[in-house]
Amino acid sequence: MTYNTILVAKDNGLATITLNAPDKLNAVSRKMIAELKQCWEELAADGSVRAVLLTGAGRGFCAGADLADPDREASATADSGSALDKYFNPVIRLMRTIPKPVVSAVNGVAAGVGMSFALASDIAIAGKSASFLQAFARIGLLPDGGSTWFLPRLVGEQRARALAMLAPQIKAEQAREWGLIWDVVEDDELMAKATETARRLAEGPTLALARIKAALNEASGNDLSAQLDLERDSQRELGRSEDFKEGVMAFLGKRKANFKGK
């Protein structure tokens, strides 16, 4: 499909989504979030896609919602929750539940829901000049896009509350130190590093990676006994997969495994 506000490229199992409104630091309009929702739905159903890389065009990853969007309701009686329910929340759910690894390459600012996109990915890598901002309190809102769920799990209660309530803008290095993201690299190395990481995942045992993702998603709501049962059931399935057989043969043969995701 052809999109107007995002770019989508597919290459050997890797799909790259680029938010494409660089003049607005990729602020999310109603049109963009609708296109993102459709894109994630299509990628989830596309068996040729084994991993997804998300980034932004130009100087910013995503500056949050586009408050100047002419399609946005701004009246005092507008229902601010309706767009979340219809578009934003489905995108976050798709990012977390799609049975494929999601990597974010954070270039420049990741603010508001843009930061939520980074937190919702499986692995986030940022350029050194990147920054992160829970901007919502600055305009009288609470963090959305799942950030009130992600933040305490990633950085603990005190830091989560300070990030949400005081809305400081923090640099990439601090975000890594706090556990918000996986890695920080030089700006000019960001896309190469993120693409290499995403391609490694696309060439990996994607059936196992999907089960890892699902198990980690379930872990926060399970007690130990339930999680042990989940691991048992998933391991039983994976132990019968072609990828497991290939992985063992490659290990014994001292060669690189050729995983098929089956």
Image (cartoon, helix red, strand yellow):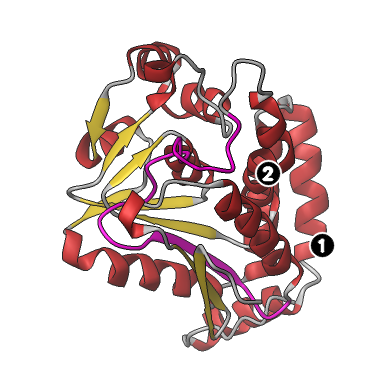
Q: Is residue 105 left or right of residue 189?
A: right
Q: Tell which tag, 1 or 2, sits nearer the viewer.
A: 2
Residue 43: quarter of image: bottom right
Task: Tell me where the magenta segment starts and ends, as one range.
Answer: 47-73
Circle nearer the N terminus (1, 2): 2
Q: Residue at x 46, y 68 (%)?
A: 198
Q: Position of residue 162 (x, y in %)?
A: 35, 13
Residue 51: quarter of image: bottom right
Q: Residue at x 56, y 27 (%)?
A: 74
Quarter of the image with the C terminus is bottom right
- Dominant secondary structure, magenta: loop
Residue nearer the viewer, 157 or 40: 40
Q: Is 191 inside the magenta-drawn segment?
A: no
Quarter of the image with the N terminus is bottom right
Instruction: Write down the residue under mark 1.
Output: 237
Residues at marks 1 and 2, CA–CA distance in whole angstroms: 34 Å
Q: Position of residue 82 (x, y in %)?
A: 72, 31
Instruction: Write down the residue under mark 2.
Output: 87
Q: Amino acid at mark 1?
A: Glu
Q: Is residue 47 left or right of residue 14?
A: right
80 vs 59: above or below: above
Q: Does any portion of residue 99 appear in the rendered image?
A: no
